[in-house]
Amino acid sequence: MLQELHVSNYALIDRIDVNFYPGLNIITGETGAGKSIMLGALSLILGARADSRTVRRTEKKSVIECMFDPSDAPELCGMFDEADIDWEPAQCILRREISPSGRSRAFINDTPVSLSFLREVALKLVDVHSQHQNQLLSDENFQRSIIDALADNGSRLERYAELFNNYRTALRKLKVAKSKLQHTNENAELIEYQLERLEKFDLKSGEQAELERERDRQAELTDLKSSFDTALDILSTNKRNILSGLNDVIDACADIEPVLDANSRIRERLEQARIELTDIAETLSDANENLAADPAELEYIEQRLEQLYELQKRHKVASEEELIQLRDRLRADLAHLEEGPAAIAELETSARKARAAARAAAKEITEARTKAAAAFANMLRERAVPLGMKNLRCEIRVESTDMTASGMDRIEFLFAFNKNQPLIPVQGAASGGEISRLMLCIKAIVADRMKLPSIVFDEVDTGVSGDVAARMGTMMQDIARNIQVIVITHLPQVAAKGAHHFKVYKEDDDTATHTRISELSTEARVDELSMMLGGDRASEATRMAARTLLGLEP
């Protein structure tokens, strides 16, 4: 429901603030007073194109702001959450700003949004119908929703939606399986070759790490063997080794012993050194023989690892586990070649069953829609003819289509407003006023069955008067029991039906003309209706007629 409208610095409006109410709100005013300006401002909230020429004072921006109660549009909560917009269950503020250069900005609850998102949200809150604008009546989704509401298709549609989703899921599984089988067939030889190589390699989980550890150990042993060989070579195995040279020293000292100091014990000390070095050489030789370095084993390990790394590179994987997973996957793919046709046949059966179930549910919806469409066409004509459309013909076509998320039907409203006129879609058949009156009739029929946005009718009464106008006013009262209705009218019979009455007027000051709007008191309403009845000239008779229209005592 539209609660407040604020407009500033727009056309003839320097600033207006107006509060609207539940039920039927009436707006009247002389031609040129600015009613269309207010409607133009409201249309900007609905995404209309901005025009810098509407900026009243070029040193500041134009601002149009609407405050809504969104409780009748709970689906907005999810939309706001996805768009990261603060959600207030009792208040939703839509704002449009236009700079003097013509640049436009849109906001919802002070969060910048795209113009398309502003429009999407606004259309769930308010619908404006004017002589030149129709928001919903020609929309296929809206037409279908009307018929579904009259057909009480809510539970049927919920069941169908579940079955249709099951069918789509079954189709997706079948498509994936067929694609996989086709791909496997096309690459069968390659898969067999790759699998043969991997199976021949016979890779075990954890083997790579074990091979790398053993390679490092073998390499370390090889280095140790080299050190042992060097030490033994110097000590005992080389032609000029330490032990051999020491024996020569001992022999030489035997000749010079007489001239040595008896206390020097040279030969004894050299003999002890020879014994110690001999023991060291034997110890090193024993340790060297006990080392298990195996060059052949190391070569095998290096070759195995090289093959493993080459397989990883060839198959573009980073580990042995991924190679094992690939091997198992290739095995499964080849098995699928044998089992695939049977699995696909099973999936095809499931898809056929899901399709049959969804089609059966869709047919129930179609039957209900067909009955409701015929009844609705009759109801619409019955309500529209008394509103000045005596030649109206209406046909609601329910045509078969492929299954979609909404069923198997395409619904189209066709109208003819004149004799001998063919039935055609409403946007090509009706004037703005006729479309508005049709929407008025539709709202009267479905208002108690659908959650509809607030509606604004502009010049819905064009070309009618007298009893027709009174009937229209009564119909608006009926609609307004369920949704908010705002009507811009020139007819006193319609204006008198409103629960709240606003007047748009011009006011001059020393420098400019301004558009104003004010809510009328009871007596002010009498005066306004009297002027409307008297053609701008009120009299006692028109005042009495105005009081009668308002249900007041003369």
Image (cartoon, helix red, strand yellow):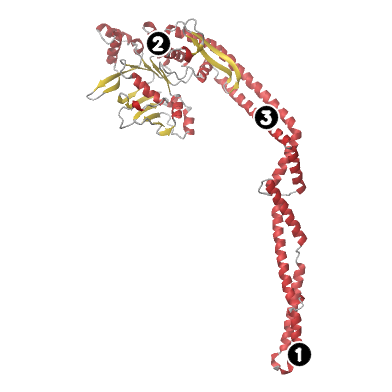
Query: In x, y percent, where is residue 133?
Result: 42, 18
Callout 2 crowding tier (Cα within 10 Å): few <14, some 14–19, many ≥20: many
Three-letter code for the amino acid on which mark 3 is drawn: Leu
**Cα distance, mark 2 to mark 1?**
147 Å
How far apart are the two marked residues, 3 and 1, measured between alpha carbons?
A: 103 Å
Quadrant (top left/top right/bottom left/bottom right) for the C terminus: top left
Sequence-wise, which precedes: disc 2 or disc 1? 1
Residue 66 on image: x %, y %: 38, 26
Category of crowding for the residue at label 1, using alpha-carbon neighbours closer than 10 angstroms: few (below 14), some (14–19), many (at least 20): few
Quadrant where the N terminus is found in the figure: top left
| Comes first in the chain, label 3 or label 2 | 3
> Is residue 20 visible in this depiction of the protein?
no
Q: What residue type is labelled 2?
A: Met
As measured in the structure, the alpha-carbon distance from the residue carrying label 3 to the one carrying label 2 is 56 Å
Per the image, label 2 sits on a secondary structure element best described as helix
Give residue 209's quadrant in the image: bottom right
| Residue 244 seen by the camera | yes
Instruction: Read off the residue under disc 3.
Output: 174
- Expressed as whole percent of the image width and height from the top left, the position of residue 95 reads 38, 29
Q: Is residue 531 left or right of residue 179?
A: left
Q: Mark 2 points at which residue?
A: 472
Q: Nearer the viewer, mark 2 or mark 1?
A: 1
Evaluate if marks 3 and 2 touch, with contact meaning CB atoms under 8 Å apart. no
User: Which residue is most to the bottom?
Assistant: 259
Q: Which of marks 3 and 1 is nearer the N terminus?
A: 3
Q: In this view, does 311 lie above or below 270?
A: above
* Residue drawn at point x = 33 percent, y = 27 percent: 55
- Where is mark 1, residue-wise? 254
Nearest to the observer: residue 161 or residue 249: 249
Q: Which residue is drawn at 49% across and 17% down?
A: 138
The disc label shown at residue 7, or none: none
